[in-house]
Structure formats: C-alpha cells, structure tokens
Image (spheres, coloured by chain):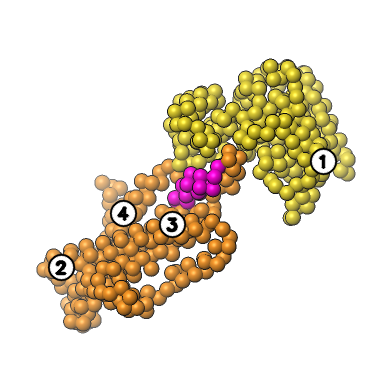
Chain colours: A yellow, B orange
C-alpha cells in the first residue's frame, strides 16, 4: 500500500559537510528518497557515505544545505551501526526493549513487542542470553531487532554486515529484504560491496571519492522477493556489471 | 585437591621459610630479640592476647570498611559531577589529585584536632587515603562509554538522566570495581595510621606496644593488619566477581 503510491520521504538539497581535520567530506549532495524504498549508498571506504547517513539520522550538526522529512516525527528513525553495540549487562530481551523503554512504553507492551521482533529475526530461543554468549551473527541480528522494535519509518544502516563471515552475511541480507518487505519502512543502507548493494537495493546511489558527490543513480531491475539463489543467476550478474561499470567510471574521473 | 594445592601451597612456602629463618636467627643470638622478636614469641602473644587482638581487628576492619563505604559514595558522586561538564572537570579535577598525594601521616594529627580521638577520625583518615582510586576510575569509566550507544540513546530522545543512569553508570561498573579494589587496601592503611594518632584498633595496639618495647606484640598486630587487609581485598574480589559476570565483554 505504501509502495504503490510512492511519495518523497526524505529530500536532501545541496548538502555539504566539512570536518576541521579532514576538510570537505560531502559536497553539494541532493537526493530524493521515496517512502518505502530500499536505497543503498555505495562508495569506496572513507568516501563520506557514513557521514551522509549520520546527517540523515540527525547525529551530526553543522552542515550546509537542507534535509527535509515528509512527516517530522522525532522517533521514527532507527540506526544500525557497523558493530552490534549491545549493552553487555543486559539480556537480549532487555537490549531489544531499550528504544521502547526510552520512549516510555509500558513494561508489559515492551516485553511483548521485543519478544515478537526477536522472533522475527530468528532469536526466539536466545532472549534470555547475554551478548557475550552470542556469535557475531546473532549479535548483529539482536542489533537489528533493537532497531526494528520501535517500528521505525526509516531504518538507517551503516555497513552492518561488513564484519560477518560470508555465509552469515548472505543469510542476514535475505532476512533483511524480507523484513523490509513486510514492514513497508524506508531503508537507507551504506556499503562498499557491489554484491551486497545489488542484492539488497531497489536503487543504488554510487558516491565518488572525497569529497563525495552522487556519481550515478542506478535502478536495480530485480524481482521484489529475493532469495540467495538469485546470486548465481544471469539477471543478477547483469545488475552487478552495471554497478561495477559505474564504480569504475568514478575511479576514471579521479585519475 | 590438586587445584587446592596449586592455589594455596606456593604462597605458604616462602612464609614458612621466612618464619624458619627468623626463628633460627633469634635462637642463635645472631639478631637481638629487641630488633627482631623470634616468630615463636609473636605466635605465643597471638594466642595469649587473642581476645585483645580480635577486638582490635574488629575495630580496624570496621573503620576501614566505613571509610571505604564513604569513599565509594562520595567518590562515585564526585566523579558523576565532574563528568557533567568540561568546566567543572577542568576547575575541580586538579584538586581531586590532592587526595592521591596527601601525606596522611602528616595531616592525621590535624584530623585529631578537628574531629577528636576515636572512631570518627579513624574513618575520615581511611576515607581520605582511599577516595582517589574510586573517583579516578569511576571518572574514566564514565568517559569511556561507547559513543555509538550515546548516539543511539539520543536518537530515541533519551534525557541526560537516562543516559547517566541507564548507560554511563552501568558502563562504568567494571571501572568502579577496579577502583574499589585498589581503595580497599588503602582504606586499611588509612585506618591503621588514623589509629596511631587517634587510638583504638590494631594501630593503637602497635603504637602502645612500641612504646612498651613489646616488639612481639608490634609484629603480631602488623601481621594481623596485613591479614585483615588481604581479607578486605578478598571480600571485594568476591563482590566484584558476583557483579561483573554480566560485564564479561567490557573487561
């Protein structure tokens, strides 16, 4: 329903950002992101894509340009970091409850919603465990659960699967696509992996190296429902080639 | 049984070796008894004046524990205050280091003038010597909080109080425990020195026996004081193990 009549959810207009130490990181970035879309920001390491994500999240002040949201609710954003960043003294359930706790949701509802979302990410049997008792993949699933528990309209993800082994990464990517499909939320996902970008995204924005600009805007022509078997099909390689070519282009421009 | 042996036997070997050497030196008349009393006499004194020693031990341990408790409460509260703003930190932290370097022996007589003879002065002496490690460790723990988690808290509209109580303080718990463990030994030292001047406890026994040339009693009390210190540190290790099993990842 949300996907059927896409409206602009986030619009960035001439956004630039400089740091004292590293100079200009983002220069004149303008993007429109539709509600319910799955957008991947793809670029080389250190290209400023994480900074862009933090700007959208509202975690960085002091930038030029404008970032507007179609509806200005404060609590509708969630963030998943590169590392799980769970609180070691809390069980998975208590970790997952955190956003609701801070939003002053009652204890009973918190437990119900946290249990539900942990079930969705496949951690139903681990709710009482502490983070130190989990594998890297499970920790990242818990981190994802924590981000989803408040049912955000916008999910921002900063290379969340980069530290995981390939098998776990593929499984989590597949699950993330499904969770996105069920919820109708908007996802902005940062990565430097072309494979990950093509598998996850509806739309890939390729960033050029420092200072980052939007180099190209690629629509990924793949079915909405995606399983890991897609990765070996020829349609998938076609998309890969399109994105790879574009990335090479940015490097050509640099030379 | 084998584990038990590996745990407790090795530290006992040097102890008995030292005792044997001391006894040998005294019995042969190589070292005069008014310089080093034979260990057998020290042991005898422990047995005959058992009640007196137990009473003194209780007093000293009690004062050290009270001083440590005061250090924990005041130290943690002060660290929280210092972490509230860069201005408070810059203007007050240099003075906090006073407690690290204070020569307690030289200000203990002052404490007697201010707080009189007895328990109050002893507790304050223990407090002054033991507050710095708690304060400094808590402070660095509060500052070591994972910045990503602070971002996350802010994203969900957490108040400063939420961030302090639900994130920063729990995050600092392993640091606080480390500080308390260091402080426990220091509190014992502070208490004994306080008792030197203000009377009572093992410090009082040491001071009185010294003036009576009863070196066996001095040695017995010193031995008990260090034993009580070890007991206190051991107790804190137990508490910290109990608390920290959840914090495994941070240690």
Q: In which chain is the residue bearing label 4?
A: B
Q: Return the x and y of residue A152 as percentages of the image width and height.
A: 62, 30
On the image, numbered disc 2 is attached to which residue? B52
On the rendered structure, is A86 left or right of A153? Answer: left
- Both marks 1 and 3 on one chain: no
Name the residue: 50% across, 32% down: A105
- Both marks 1 and 4 on one chain: no
Tell me the mark number nearer the camera, choosing from 3 and 4: 3
Spatial distance from mark 4 to mark 2, Cα to Cα?
Answer: 24 Å
On the image, numbered disc 4 is attached to which residue? B235
Tell me the mark number nearer the camera, choosing from 1 and 4: 1
What number is the disc on residue B76?
A: 3
From the viewer's side, name the closer residue of A100 and B12: A100
Q: In which chain is the residue bearing label 2?
A: B
Figure quadrant of residue A170: top right
Name the residue: 43% across, 57% down: B76
Spatial distance from mark 1 to mark 3, Cα to Cα?
Answer: 47 Å
Q: In which chain is the residue bearing label 3?
A: B
Give the mark, 4 or 2, whose residue is nearer the N terminus: 2
Spatial distance from mark 3 to mark 4, Cα to Cα?
Answer: 20 Å
The crowd level at tag 4 (other Cα within 10 Å; few <14, some 14-19, many 20+) is: some
Q: Return the x and y of residue A18 as percentages of the image width and height.
A: 77, 50
Spatial distance from mark 1 to mark 4, Cα to Cα?
Answer: 61 Å
């Amino acid at each position: 329903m949300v996907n059927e009549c896409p409206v602009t959810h986030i619009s960035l207009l001439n956004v630039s950002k400089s740091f004292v130490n590293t100079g200009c990181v983002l220069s004149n970035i303008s993007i429109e992101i539709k509600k319910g879309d799955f957008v991947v920001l793809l670029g080389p390491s250190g290209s400023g894509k994480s900074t862009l994500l933090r700007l959208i999240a509202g975690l960085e002040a002091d930038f030029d340009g404008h970032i507007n949201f179609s509806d200005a609710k404060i609590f509708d954003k969630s963030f998943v970091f590169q590392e799980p960043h769970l609180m070691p003294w809390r069980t998975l359930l208590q970790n997952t409850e955190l956003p609701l706790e801070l939003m002053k949701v009652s204890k009973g509802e918190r437990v119900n919603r946290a249990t539900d979302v942990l079930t969705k990410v496949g951690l139903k049997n681990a709710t009482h465990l502490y983070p130190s008792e989990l594998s890297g993949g499970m920790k990242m699933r818990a981190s994802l659960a924590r981000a989803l528990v408040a049912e955000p309209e916008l999910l921002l993800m900063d290379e969340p699967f980069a530290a995981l082994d390939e098998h776990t990464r593929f499984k989590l990517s597949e699950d993330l696509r499904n969770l996105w499909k069920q919820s109708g939320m908007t996802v902005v996902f940062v990565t430097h992996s072309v494979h990950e970008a093509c598998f996850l995204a509806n739309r890939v924005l390729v960033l050029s190296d420092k200072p980052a600009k939007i180099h190209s805007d690629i629509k990924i022509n793949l079915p909405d429902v995606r399983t890991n078997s897609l990765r070996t099909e020829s349609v998938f390689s076609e998309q890969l080639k399109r994105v790879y070519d574009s990335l090479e282009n940015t490097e050509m421009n640099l030379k | 049984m084998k584990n038990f042996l590996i745990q407790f036997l090795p530290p006992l070997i040097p102890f008995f070796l030292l005792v044997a050497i001391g006894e040998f030196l005294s019995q042969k008349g190589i070292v005069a008894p008014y310089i080093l009393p034979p260990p057998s006499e020290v042991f005898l004194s422990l047995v005959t004046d058992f009640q007196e020693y137990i009473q003194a031990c209780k007093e000293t341990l009690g004062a050290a524990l009270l001083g440590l408790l005061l250090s924990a409460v005041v130290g943690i509260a002060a660290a929280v205050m210092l972490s509230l703003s860069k201005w408070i930190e810059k203007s007050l932290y240099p003075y906090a280091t006073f407690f690290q370097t204070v020569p307690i022996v030289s200000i203990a007589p002052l404490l007697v003038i201010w707080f009189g003879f007895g328990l109050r002065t002893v507790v304050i002496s223990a407090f002054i010597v033991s507050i710095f490690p708690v304060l400094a460790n808590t402070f660095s723990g509060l500052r070591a909080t994972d910045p990503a988690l602070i971002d996350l808290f802010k994203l969900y509209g957490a108040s400063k109080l939420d961030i302090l109580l639900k994130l920063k303080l729990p995050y600092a718990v392993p640091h606080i425990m480390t500080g308390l463990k260091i402080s426990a030994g220091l509190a014992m030292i502070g208490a004994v020195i306080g008792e030197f001047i203000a009377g009572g406890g093992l410090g009082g026994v040491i001071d009185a026996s010294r003036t009576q040339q009863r070196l066996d009693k001095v040695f017995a009390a010193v031995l008990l004081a260090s034993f009580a210190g070890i007991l206190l540190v051991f107790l804190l290790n137990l508490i910290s193990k109990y608390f920290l099993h959840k914090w495994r990842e941070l240690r």
